[in-house]
Amino acid sequence: MKTPSTPASRKVPVTILTGFLGAGKTTLLNRILRERHGERIAVIENEFGEAGVDNDLLLTSGDEQIVEMNNGCICCTVRGDLVRILGELRQRREAAPGAFDRVIIETTGLADPAPVAQTFFIDDDIAAYYALDAIVTVVDAKHAPTQLDECHEAAEQVAFADRILLSKTDLVSALERERLRARLVRINPRAAIAAVDFGQTPIADLLDIGGFSLDSILEIEPGFLGEDQHEHDDAVRSFVFTSAAPLDPGRLQAFFREAIAAHAKDLMRYKGIVAFEGLAHRVVLQGVHMLMNSDIGRPWAEGEARESKLVFIGRNLPHDEFAASLARCRVS
């Protein structure tokens, strides 16, 4: 039995936030969550691998509802979980109407957005309650040319975008920016393109833009509503290192120097939360290939377990070698 449809103007708007590994999706999401727009947002986080850290990277106010999905990629093995979670969020909102006003889905950097978007058209219950407002794609200006050449997911994310945000433009020349912009327009001439600096962009360009057009998508992929298969490169795997003991900053820095020198091309993404001995705040690490940065995160709460967690995503990475080297970074 179909659920009675809600008028489109009253459906819960959904934004799909996508972009390749390390493009800056979580940074942009933090920007949205910090904005004083007066709305409560339910966030669905998807990470590639058995454990995630993005929930720790979000700067939330406590009003948001965060749901993590890290047991597979949202566009294939766990899409059924997405339907289930959206259904549970609906029940929660109907029981407490002020629970949230909209949903943002942050996909893993390896997700093809097409199967995610399909969910809002081929599942009757979801289509009756939610409205897909837009697909917003963050593109890493520094690494996008290579990513578009080597990874079809990167091209799919651009092709399905209603808004394209160029990050890290300060790391490339004006000529490189224009060449990339021209390439993006060739892939997707209908999406507006704008630069984004550490997530700073007008909220009006991201939410309630009514950008998703099923007719336009069907022009790109006539089989959009029928496709249900997506495959990933089997060589791309995730690896998680955790430590209950604090880490030594000098040894960890040496590990990253050596790992980047030896595996930069294959280190597609690495990120995590680190506990250093004697430091009251967690340290947030983020990296893509050879580019890495660190920042001071939230303070550790009193009585909170100070666990370090580092996630690596890449092609043919030496997991055992990484694990052994990271273990030697522990402070005994």
Image (tube, rainbow, N blue to C red):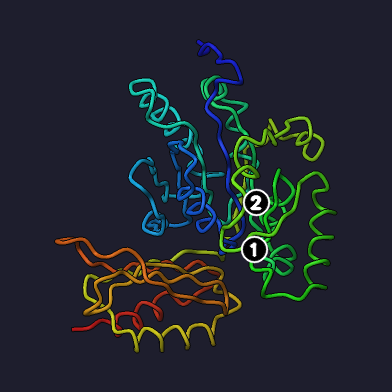
Q: Is residue 186 above or below residue 227?
A: below
Q: Is residue 62 left or right of residue 153?
A: left
Q: Nearer the viewer, residue 250 or 102?
A: 102
Image quadrant where residue 66 sits:
top left
Image quadrant where residue 327 sits:
bottom left
Q: Is residue 217 above or below residue 2?
A: below
Q: Is residue 83 left or right of residue 91?
A: right
Q: Nearer the viewer, residue 11 or 32?
A: 32
Could you tell me residue 31's position as x and y percent?
51, 53
What is the secondary structure assignment of the residue under circle 1?
A: strand
Could you tell me residue 243's position as x and y percent?
26, 71
The residue that label 2 is drawn on is 137
Question: Is label 1 in contact with label 2 (beta carbons under 8 Å)?
Answer: no
Give the quarter of the figure containing the C terminus: bottom left
What is the secondary structure assignment of the residue under circle 2?
A: strand
Q: Amino acid at mark 1?
A: Ser
The residue that label 1 is drawn on is 167
Badge 1 crowding class, 10 Å Cα cut-off, few under 14, some 14 to 19, many 20 or more, is: many
Could you tell me residue 26's position as x and y percent?
50, 56
User: From mark 1 to mark 2, how far is it between C-alphas?
Assistant: 10 Å
Which residue shows up at 52% across the image and 68% down it? Answer: 269
Q: Amino acid at mark 2?
A: Thr
Mark with earlier residue (1, 2):
2
Q: Nearer the viewer, mark 1 or mark 2?
A: 1
Q: Is residue 231 left or right of residue 247?
A: right
Q: For the image shown, how many numbered marks are present on the structure?
A: 2
